[in-house]
Amino acid sequence: MTQLRPIRYRSRALALGGALWLALLTGCGNAEKADNDGAEGSGSGSGQEVNVYSGRHYNTDKELYKQFTAKTGIKVNLLEGKDDELIVRLKSEGQNSPADVLVLVDAARIQRARQEELFQPINSEALNRDVPANLRDPDGSWFALTRRARPIMVNSALVDPTSLGSYADLTNPDLKDKLCLRNRASVYNQSLVADILEQKGTAATTTWLQGLVANVKTPFFTSDTPMLRALGRGECGVTVANQYYLARMLSDQSKPEDRALAEKVTVVFPKPTHVNITAAGVTRHARNPEAATQLIEFLASPSSGKGYAAANFEYPLKGFGDNAILSGFGTFEASPVSADQLARGNREASALMVETGWK
Ligand SMILES: [Fe+2]
């Protein structure tokens, strides 16, 4: 059985906020004993520890961290929090931060952390092999661990899925008052717009945004799941949402009412489809950068990476994984725009959203 217990740190900063430290141990939940019982501590890193700040909150992640400990002997201490809070926290802790690894969701956020100089570049043969070049920082400051797509989703009673081949088709005047969108505060939408911006340029993206805003059924949503429920109920005919929200609603983790609504939704992967990432980097002041690198290498490796992606109905770095719900959605051609380009385009994308009235 998994046993989690808070870890005591002297740093006062760690008592802040709603984040939670968890020590991840196998078996009895006692570090000293665990190091001696043969199930872990057998690797060369026995006695070492690596501290992870993570914006992800999935139990299966913890299982993987424990597998890492079993394989290497390096103990993982996990602090979970909201992505933006973790960035603020790491920044305020400065060189006193206990964090060795920072895991964040969305290219724009990981780039923000990079701009705050929270990472140190690492050069790892394994990471350069396992993480495709378009899914890692060109200087080695961060590396993607999973991929998530933001396809078009349709209620086929209201909108013909075959009428939608690309994000450009969302501006078709036939969709007036049928298009539901999450608000512009969503980093997911900012990254989607940055993707189009990189592919089409400022003028075409502005026209596209004007077309979207003209079709929007207001109010804008504050998160994806309520938007998908509205789509299932027929209050919206079409939207864009991350695939894992729909997959969760379809899974046995969700309530029967949600499952019934999700069953009314058809996923349409536009050509090409916008793809974003979960990514990790070694922190600038890491006390154990070697162990931190080893952990990121482990999580990005094809075998562990599959489990890390599956934890949140995400896609592995290469291919589409073997989850039955995701397989039911079909496969997609990923946008050629790199995670680094998405991040760099965020500022202009956000400004264009304001300019064109995306609330
Ligand atoms: Fe999300």
Image: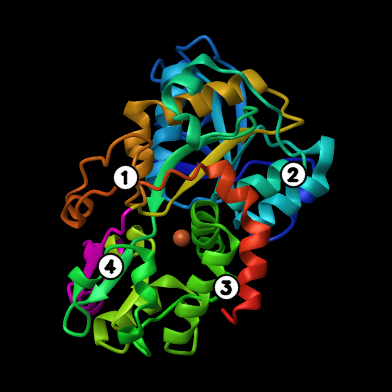
- Per the image, the residue denoted by label 2 is 115
- Kindly identify which numbered label has been placed on residue 184: 3
Q: From mark 2 to mark 3, how far is it between C-alphas?
A: 22 Å
Write down the residue under mark 1: 310
Could you tell which of marks 2 and 3 lies nearer the N-terminus?
2
Point out the image quarter for the C terminus. Answer: bottom right
Q: CA distance from mark 4 to mark 1?
A: 15 Å
Q: Secondary structure at mark 2?
A: helix
Image location (x, y in percent) of residue 4: 49, 44
Q: Quadrant of residue 11?
A: top right
Secondary structure, mark 1, is helix
What percent of the width, then of the height, locates residue 138? Answer: 61, 30
User: Do the CB atoms of the residues marked 2 and 4 lie less than 8 Å apart?
Assistant: no
For badge 2, the amino acid type reads: Gln
Q: Is residue 229 magenta?
A: no
Q: Which of labels 2 and 4 is toward the front? A: 2
Whether disc 4's CB lies below 8 Å from ligand 1 is answered no
Question: Relative to residue 192, is residue 305 depicted above or below?
Answer: above
The first of marks 2 and 4 along the sequence is 2
Marks 1 and 3, Cα distance to the nearest angstrom? 28 Å
* Residue identified by numbered label 4: 249
Q: Earlier in the sequence, mark 1 or mark 2?
A: 2
Label 1 to label 2, Cα distance in Å? 30 Å
Q: Earlier in the sequence, mark 4 or mark 3?
A: 3
